[in-house]
């Protein structure tokens, strides 16, 4: 088993979110003390990982002084991804044309979180415009993996994941279209949940009805993710596809006994994408450890015709939709891969869009039928672990050449297209010591049950959730 790096930050930063909130509610610690501890930890870790790129100490201190200990989050500091506006705080989307932008108004999700007791500590790093699974941009540079700073932290919520892993925050906000929550959670050894569309706000950009980009919670434990989802959830007229929260909180559902479980394990999702042998072995070993009289694991090989073309079409259409309304002084400065993605969207024909619509419905029907015989679908988050931070995307996986950065994200496509909740659960480490997560995909609108299952599996695996000090390394990968 990989030796866990030490943690030498403030003791308060090693707590789970639920533990910290319990202290806040008992008046045993103040919100200002947590802000000070978190900012101290950011200062300690920033040179190594570059995760929270825009702390806002004065704003956080003022909010902490007014924190209401009777709210859900009770004054707990959180991180907000740098794709989401926070009033008075520099918000750049990682792109040069917005490098100095300071919004006057916060995103509705930020307002909701603050109403429920969150204190915004600062903004976390992201690839330019959130496009890419390696977190770097021309405004703030690279975010590095806390477990080995030569490596990347995943993306696009790489700053959120790296900060959580090192104890900069207890909860951190992310967003996900092509695995942007799930990939960095896997790479950094934390938990990330992509909820169903409409549960936790929207990151659809200029298309408020889009079901593809969603906001979601990240934390070091499943129960903390459930708590954060409770803080995010709810209906808001500004989000056309939003709906009310469940009668039973996500946290209460998460903590309940899941009973006997049936896990369908698809090692490569029916040949959808190559999987590195070390990754395949790590996932198989984890499923073998989980199998028991109460947890049945069955290997399956689903047929998912048309999934890649379907995802690429929907994503390209979404990018073109946003680009058409973006000022040229901003879009003219985009990185080449982002400009290429947008250009593809502008060439789509009506037949290609129609085929993507019908393919998505067929895939959903197949998944709905699958869930009649299992509780959750398990598969890779990605077919490969973290690479050197300077590599934008892997040139090949298991001997199969990549053509672009979407090739290695194919395991993210299914949940996104079908509107299904999906969670990255830490399950161990690769032979090089870097973390690896297992993707768990739940039933339609099945967040509560998915969280319940994930927490139970987390308990069975017994992995520690304490944060770590960054492992600073130089030179070639061992």
Image (cartoon, helix red, strand yellow):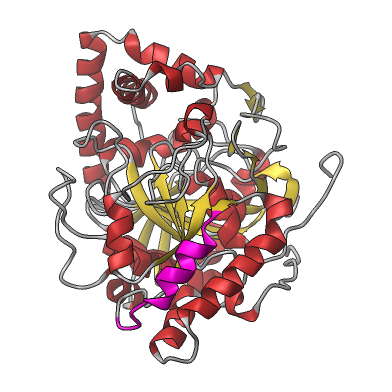
Q: Which residues are magenta?
A: 55-70
- What is the x, y in percent for residue 224? 43, 70
The mark total stands at 0
Residue sitting at 45 percent across and 43 percent down? 91
- What is the x, y in percent for residue 187? 60, 49
- Is-magenta flag for residue 66? yes
Asked which quadrant contains residue 308, the reply is: top left
In this picture, is 51 found above or below 476? below
Q: Is residue 33 visible?
A: yes
- Name the image quarter holding the N terminus: bottom right
In this picture, is 276 found above or below 426? above
Residue sitting at 61 percent across and 29 percent down? 393
Q: Nearer the viewer, residue 274 or 212?
A: 212
- Is-magenta flag for residue 193? no
Q: Nearer the viewer, residue 292 or 147?
A: 147
In this picture, is 187 found above or below 447? above
- What is the x, y in percent for residue 39? 60, 66
Residue sitting at 50 percent across and 56 percent down? 122
Asked which quadrant contains residue 235, the reply is: bottom left
Q: Nearer the viewer, residue 15 or 410?
A: 15
- Name the image quarter holding the C terminus: top right
Q: Residue furthest right?
A: 475
Q: Is residue 76 visible?
A: no
- What is the x, y in percent for residue 32? 50, 77
In this picture, is 342 found above or below 405? above
């Amino acid at each position: 088993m990989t030796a866990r790096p030490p943690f030498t930050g403030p003791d308060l930063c090693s707590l789970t979110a639920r533990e910290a909130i319990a202290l806040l509610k008992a008046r045993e610690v103040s919100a200002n003390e947590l802000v000070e501890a978190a900012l101290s930890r950011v200062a300690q870790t920033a040179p190594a990982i570059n995760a929270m790129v825009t702390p806002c100490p004065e704003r956080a201190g003022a909010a902490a002084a007014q924190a209401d200990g009777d709210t859900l989050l009770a004054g707990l500091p959180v991180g907000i991804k740098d794709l989401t506006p926070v009033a008075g705080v520099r918000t750049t989307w990682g792109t040069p044309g917005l490098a100095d932008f300071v919004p006057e108004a916060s995103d509705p999700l930020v307002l909701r979180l603050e109403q429920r007791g969150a204190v915004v500590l600062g903004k976390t790093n992201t690839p330019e415009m959130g496009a890419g699974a390696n977190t770097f941009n021309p405004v703030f540079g690279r975010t590095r993996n806390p477990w080995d700073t030569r490596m990347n932290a995943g993306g696009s919520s790489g700053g959120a994941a790296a900060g959580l892993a090192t104890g900069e925050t207890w909860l951190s906000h992310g967003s996900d279209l092509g695995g942007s929550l799930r990939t960095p959670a896997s790479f950094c050894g934390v938990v990330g949940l992509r909820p169903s569309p409409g549960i936790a706000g929207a990151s659809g950009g200029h298309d408020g009805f889009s079901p593809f980009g969603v906001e979601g919670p990240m934390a070091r434990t499943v129960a903390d993710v459930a708590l954060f989802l409770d803080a995010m959830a709810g209906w808001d007229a500004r989000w056309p596809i939003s709906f009310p929260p469940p009668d039973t909180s996500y946290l209460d559902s998460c903590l309940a006994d899941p009973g006997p479980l049936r896990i369908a394990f698809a090692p490569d999702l029916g040949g959808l994408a190559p999987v590195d042998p070390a990754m395949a072995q790590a996932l198989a070993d984890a499923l073998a450890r989980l199998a028991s009289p109460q947890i049945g694991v069955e290997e399956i090989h689903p047929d998912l015709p048309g999934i890649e073309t379907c995802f690429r079409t929907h994503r390209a259409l979404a990018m073109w939709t946003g680009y058409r309304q973006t000022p040229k002084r901003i879009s003219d400065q985009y990185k080449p891969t982002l400009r290429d993605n947008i250009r593809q969207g502008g060439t789509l024909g009506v037949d290609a869009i129609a085929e993507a619509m019908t393919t998505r419905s067929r895939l959903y029907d197949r998944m709905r039928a699958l869930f009649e015989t299992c509780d959750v679908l398990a598969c890779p988050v990605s077919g490969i672990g973290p690479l050197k931070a300077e590599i934008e995307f892997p040139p090949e996986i298991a001997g199969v050449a990549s053509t672009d950065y979407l090739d290695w994200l194919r395991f993210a496509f299914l949940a996104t297209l079908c509107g299904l909740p999906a969670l990255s659960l830490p399950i161990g480490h690769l032979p090089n010591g870097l973390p690896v997560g297992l993707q768990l995909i739940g039933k339609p609108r099945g967040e509560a049950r998915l969280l319940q299952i994930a927490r139970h599996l987390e308990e069975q695996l017994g992995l520690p959730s304490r944060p770590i000090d960054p492992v600073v390394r130089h030179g070639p990968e061992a």
